[in-house]
Amino acid sequence: MNKENILKKMESYSLTSFGKTLAKCSYKEKYIALAKALMEEIVPTWIQSEEKFEGKKQAYYLSAEFLMGRALTNNLLNMKSKAIVEELFEDMGIDFNTIEEAEEDAGLGNGGLGRLAACFLDSGATLNYPLTGYGIRYQFGIFKQLFIDGFQVEIGDNWLEHGDPWSIRKASEAITVSFADGDVLAVPYDTPIIGFGQKTINTLRLWQAEALNKFDFEEFNHQNYDLSVKDKNDAENISKVLYPNDSNDEGKLLRLKQQYFFVSASLQDLVRKYKEKYQDHNFDNFAKLHAVQLNDTHPGVAIPEMMRLLTQQENLSWEKAWKIVVDTFAYTNHTLLAEALEQWSVKLYQELLPEVYEIIVKIDQQLREELEAKGITKKELPQFEIISNGMIKMAWLSIYGTKSTNGVAQLHTDLLTEVELNHWYKLYPERFNNKTNGITQRRWLLQSNPELSNYITELLGSDNWITNLEELKKLNQVSDDKEVLKEFINIKQTKKNQLADYIKENEGIEVDPKSIFDIQIKRLHEYKRQLLKAFYILDLYYRLKEDPSLDIVPRTFIFGAKAAPGYFRAKGIIKFINEIKKLVNNDSEINGKIKVVFVENYRVSYAERLFPAADISEQISTAGKEASGTGNMKFMLNGAPTIGTYDGANVEIVEEAGEENNFIFGLRVEDIAKIENYDPKAEYVNVKGLQRVIDSLIDGTFDDGGTGMFKELHDSILKGASWHKPDNYYIVRDFDDYRKAQLEVDQAFREKMTWAKKCWLNIANAGKFSSDRTIDQYAKEIWGIEKA
Ligand SMILES: *Cc1c(COP(=O)(O)O)cnc(C)c1O
């Protein structure tokens, strides 16, 4: 790739698409012209990639979410062309950063689950595995978050307003998907997934819903203008918007339509291509050539849909089709929260997908017969029923209809096999396995922290860590080298300064870049316990007021989180933190000793600025509730120790980096299992300072604008509610231990060099948490695919 070529292509694109010279184009237009110029470089290699995998077994990742973020810099780095393009813009007198900032995030996901899918695609392409992503091209991604008066307000995310230069519409490959109330067209949009070094370019195929009949001339002639476009609107609604719920599902008709829409289109796509390529109408080799991974149960309808395609369209016997299905599909479980296990009402399925429903009935019947044959008694039977009490249990369907069920961290998998899914585990022990999540170091270190990346490359004398993160282990050897630790401290300070500038510009808050940057960024959820951190901050504030000489290291508490729009309590917690922020930041007596920041609209591109600037990573979920977490890994890789519970992948992080280099506190899973007669109301009066901060929710300290949010939050801790006991997440029981751990952080941070060593040992031992390792395990242990 050369500069002149790219410039020429950008110039001609500006003329034909924007009707002006490149010089006259806005930053956004220049970004689009650049992306289009790069696509001309990408597509030929992309086509070659597809050809090299022909005839080989391939893997397909079905996911309702792909939280991709921005593509430009990621693609340039993976093409090893970032420097050239930066130079090109420098020649034009343009700061390349303004071009990067012109790109909208592709926010087609809620949080960890969608971001995992994005990291997996990056790793698949980089490792030269044939891995295709299948999902939905939502017209509106995750909402944009505003704070008005401290309340979350949601705005539609119209990310396609100026088009998406990275995707190609493949109209000729459209597929018809049938519902009881009519057919819709699924039109694929393909995005290249460029592996590092550009040897392999894989595909993310997202389906857009369109009407078969976009315009009814007859209705138009009769002046029924609404009816003339009714089919168009009804169809387009299916891929209109991402459901903004994280880890709990609403059971809405449109959501079910979305699931079936993308699953049916993807499977029909596979069947069609298989028949074209292999001329095999018996499907004898289908399972040998395809591995399909279901990202949670959202695409679980794939099991009956594949049965429908094989038995009804392709006329295979039920028995043969069932074997193909079980051998082809695998399922990833992402949650231990019982309330988040997906269920659909029989009525909804019957209404929308009657044929698919009949197949689920047959699957349920077959399971009952199998269980009876295995000697399962009538009494034990109900715990396995796929259809029960008028509901369809998607997790049961997904375990029964696949060859593999995996958890996403060792603790999570252990809890699945020993507790939550123990009855299934006893039935099919060979199906269960663990695949600890990971993150791609290309985005979460190379791209987001070039300063640290360059230094690591310099120390190691090679950039092999970019594709083999275990190389970082060698950094253990220099963990006592003062020069190395000093340079790390400098780099961390640079990243903190950059974040401080960005926060000043975007949040209007001045923070002290020398203070401890204490960061909790993740979806807002009671189990993640943002409220525990909020109570801690308020307690610290009161202690500072009582004793202004209290000796603490200045600290900046940073939050970033979206709440599902219908999750009243989560929105109450956002408002509460924003009230604490107002109190603390406006108190001149506190004199900047502590500050609170709640960044607006936390998303992938903001995350890329936050992780590298963190001094301490907050991973404080109630033990047993966070399946894995991946934010914890991004912090670790950027040299921030964890203050956290023994939960999810925190367990493995501490195992790798050493408990002495992190701050573990609180109840463990086995402690919680033993708790009886928990009475937080009796307990909270005995923990110094705790009653004061919890009661601030109701004693007039703060104003929730008459919404009743704060009273409801207070009740959730001390009284409980119809659906849960008081303090369901053990904030009261864990508060004092958390406060002690925070005191240890404060003390440890004062010793600059020993602190830096802790950070360094986290980086040096982060190798395990590359999604390259995760994908390699999926490829070898579940999919049976090979590298090109
Ligand atoms: C990594 C990431 C998450 C997941 O964070 P957890 O702390 O694991 O819940 C969510 N959102 C974004 C934008 C991320 O980058």
Image (cartoon, rainbow, N blue to C red):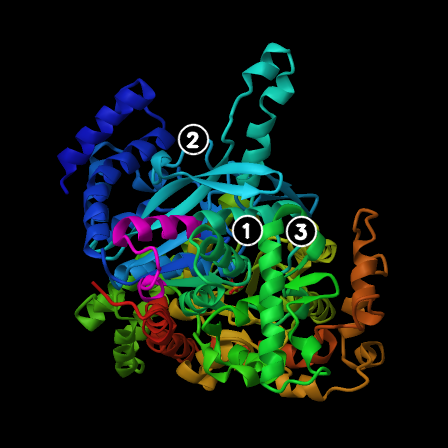
Q: Which residues are magenta?
A: 266-290
Residue under the image location 79 percent in, 51 percent down = 704
Please tell me which residue lies in front, 195 or 453.
Answer: 195
Q: Position of residue 254 (x, y in %)?
A: 62, 45
Q: CA distance from mark 2 to mark 1?
A: 27 Å
Mark closer to the observer (3, 1): 3
**Side (left or right) of 526 relative to 4:** right
In the rendered image of this protein, does residue 296 appear above or below residue 305? below
- For the N terminus, the quadrant is top left
In the rendered image of this protein, does residue 318 appear above or below residue 243? below
Numbered disc 2: secondary structure: loop
- For the C terminus, the quadrant is bottom left
**Side (left or right) of 205 relative to 396:** left
**Side (left or right) of 19 relative to 357:** left
Residue 162, labelled with which disc? 2
Q: Are marks 3 and 1 in contact (CB under 8 Å)?
A: no
Q: Position of residue 131 (x, y in %)?
A: 33, 59
In the rendered image of this protein, does residue 740 appear above or below residue 20? below
Q: Earlier in the sequence, mark 3 or mark 1?
A: 1
Q: Which residue is mark 1?
A: 259
Look at the image and tell me whether residue 467 can be seen.
yes
Residue 464, labelled with which disc? none
Please tell me which residue lies in front, 295 or 102.
Answer: 295
In the rendered image of this protein, does residue 782 appear above or below residue 495? below
The amino acid beneath tag 3 is Gln
The amino acid beneath tag 1 is Gln
Q: Which residue is mark 3?
A: 350
Mark closer to the observer (2, 1): 1
Q: Position of residue 586 (x, y in %)?
A: 67, 52
Residue under the image location 52 percent in, 46 percent down = 261
